[in-house]
Image (cartoon, helix red, strand yellow):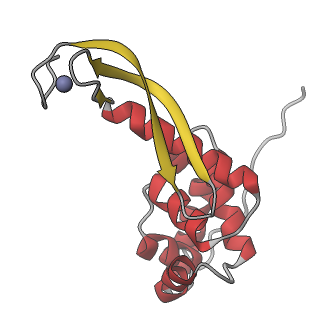
């Protein structure tokens, strides 16, 4: 590809990208990029940037620090709208927005839930998301009044 800025040619290289997550600590990720031989500008593939964001979210989850900023970053990276999360949990969307805005008193259980999702290899389609959606169905009254017994067979190992 040609550089958009100076029309110079680009070569495969790396670039450092900073993520300012707002927890008083910066994340610097070295990632593959097309680097301009002329002006040095770096071009990062959209998928690469997305993967880097997910890796930052995983590390935020590991930090164990339940701040509004880390909550917001993980939620956005997972692609979960605040309203959706609020509906799935049965809490007010305003609560989520307050945690994220004021960066204090984030409900630890909700933060841990999000951290668990951020740690899952398949993120938004992971086990925790599935459990949340099941809970949301239960909340919404979609379940039949008498669903009957849950039957399954336990196989020998
Ligand atoms: Zn250039």
Q: Residue furthest front?
A: 39
Image quadrant, ligand 1: top left
Q: Is residue 122 left or right of residue 67?
A: left
Residue 129: x and y in percent read 57, 56
**In this view, 104 is above or below 85:** below
Q: Looking at this view, is 156 or 37 the one in front?
A: 37
Q: In which quadrant of the rendered image does the N terminus lie?
A: top left
Q: Is residue 76 left or right of residue 150?
A: left
Residue at x-position 60% and y-position 69%: 135
Residue at x-position 52% and y-position 70%: 137
**In this view, 145 is above or below 10:** below
Residue 60: x and y in percent read 65, 53
Residue at x-position 69% and y-position 83%: 105
Q: Image quarter for residue 144?
A: bottom right
Q: Image quarter for residue 102?
A: bottom right
Q: Residue furthest right?
A: 157
Q: Looking at this view, is 41 or 29 the one in front?
A: 41
* Residue 149 visible in the displayed image: yes
Residue 38: x and y in percent read 21, 18
Q: Is residue 80 left or right of residue 4?
A: right
Q: Looking at this view, is 150 or 89 the one in front?
A: 89
Q: How many marks?
A: 0
Q: In which quadrant of the rendered image does the C terminus lie?
A: top right
* Residue 141 visible in the displayed image: no
Residue at x-position 90% and y-position 29%: 156
Residue 90: x and y in percent read 56, 82
């Amino acid at each position: 590809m040609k550089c958009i800025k100076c029309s110079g040619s680009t070569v495969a290289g790396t670039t450092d990208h900073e993520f300012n997550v707002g927890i008083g600590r910066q994340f610097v990720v070295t990632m593959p990029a097309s680097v301009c031989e002329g002006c040095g500008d770096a071009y990062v593939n959209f998928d690469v940037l997305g993967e880097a964001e997910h890796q930052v979210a995983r590390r935020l989850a590991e930090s164990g620090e339940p701040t509004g900023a880390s909550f917001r970053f993980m939620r956005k990276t997972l692609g979960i709208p605040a309203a959706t999360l609020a509906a799935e949990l049965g809490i007010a969307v305003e609560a989520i927005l307050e945690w994220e805005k004021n960066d204090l008193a984030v409900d630890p259980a909700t933060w841990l839930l999000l951290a668990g999702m951020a740690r899952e290899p398949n993120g938004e389609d992971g086990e925790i998301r599935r459990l949340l959606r099941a809970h949301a169905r239960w909340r919404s009254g979609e379940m039949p009044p008498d669903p009957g017994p849950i039957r399954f067979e336990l196989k020998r190992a």
